[in-house]
Image: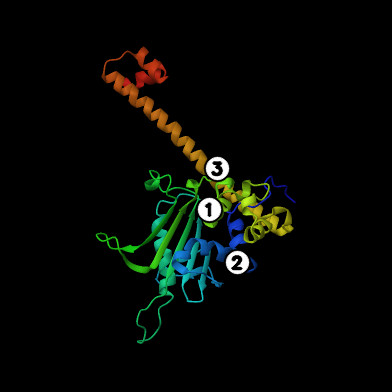
Amino acid sequence: MTEFREKYINPFTDYGFKRLFGDEPNKDLLIDFLNELLKEEQGEITELTYLKNENLSTTELNRKAIFDLYCTNKRGEKFIVELQKTKQKFFKDRTVYYSTFPIREQAVIGSEWNFELKKVYTIAILDFIFDEDKSQPEKLRYDVKLSDIETKKIFYDKLTFIYLEMPKFNKSAEELETKFDKWLYVLKNLHKLDRIPEKLKENIFLKLFETAEIAKFSQSEYQEYEDSLKYYRDIKNSLDTAKEEGKVEGKIEGKIEVARTGLKEGLSVEIIMKLTGMTKEEIEKLKE
């Protein structure tokens, strides 16, 4: 059996997220999280039913939408909960596309349907920050509905997208004030903890920590988590490598640009060598 350095699972792994929120015995964890996230919208959610998280499109392309979690409440409202580990170019498009599946599922065959729809919520927990949001380091939650541009009033309230940019959450355990703070802290830091912080010694979080304790896994659960963790680490390492390579390439391009400008301004090769760290041969090639 593998010895993990961490005491608790990483919620940003597929296995970790499903273990905490996708199993019937732990449904109360998901309900509590959604209640904190949506209490102004929903009141109190008392019951959820997991739905099959794979839906087939009705188009000829027969594309699949595969949700991390898909569930419904007593009123027939639908909840898609997505965990996104890496930046994706068209991720917002993807969430809009996914929201169309629970909308179309509500269609009634026959001529009597009046097109009334139940609400659909798409919740995206992100392990990255959208490029356009980097100038707002304090804003980590985005609630999106269809609204009128001029009046800013909500035009249609049955379609809601919530994005949580987790890298922006930086509160320590001592700074946690609300239940929502506590949930965000757990999601971001669970795998880094070796004990339960005092402010998280509530029944719901005690159950979460017990569920997440790796030492209590069976052999098959260990293997599933190890595979999921390896996949997560591979993605993170690939991204880190790409970032570093991008920095190096950026530095090289910057040096070349400085050298070109220096040559145009008539600076000597020796001075350009000192400015850029480039060799004489590299600068001579630029001359050519």
Sequence order check, earlier mark of 1 and 2: 2
Whether residue 182 is situated above or below residue 280 in the rendered picture: below
Which one is in front, 117 or 148?
148
Q: Are marks 3 and 2 in contact (CB under 8 Å)?
A: no
Residue 230 in the figure: left or right of residue 106: right
Of circles 1 and 2, the one toward us is: 1
Residue that lies at the very extreme toward the left in this rendered image: 150
What residue is drawn where x is 42% and y is 19%? 277
Tell me where residue 250 sits by quadrant. Answer: top left
Residue 189 horizontal/vertical position (percent): 59, 48
Q: Nearer the viewer, mark 1 or mark 3?
A: 1
* Residue nearest the observer in this picture, 100 or 166: 166
Which residue is the site of mark 1? 181
Q: Amino acid at mark 3?
A: Asn
| Mark 3 neighbour density, 10 Å: few (under 14) some (14–19) many (20 or more) | few
Residue position marked by numbered label 2 in the rendering: 28
In the picture provided, is 211 more to the left or to the right than 166?
right
Identify the mark nearer the N-term, 1 or 3.
1
Query: Residue at the right extreme?
Result: 1
Residue 149, placed above or below residue 250: below
Secondary structure state at the residue bearing disc 2: helix
Q: Residue furthest front?
A: 177
Label 1, secondary structure: give it.
Answer: helix
Please give the label number shown on residue 237. 3
Q: Residue 225: x, y in percent?
A: 65, 55
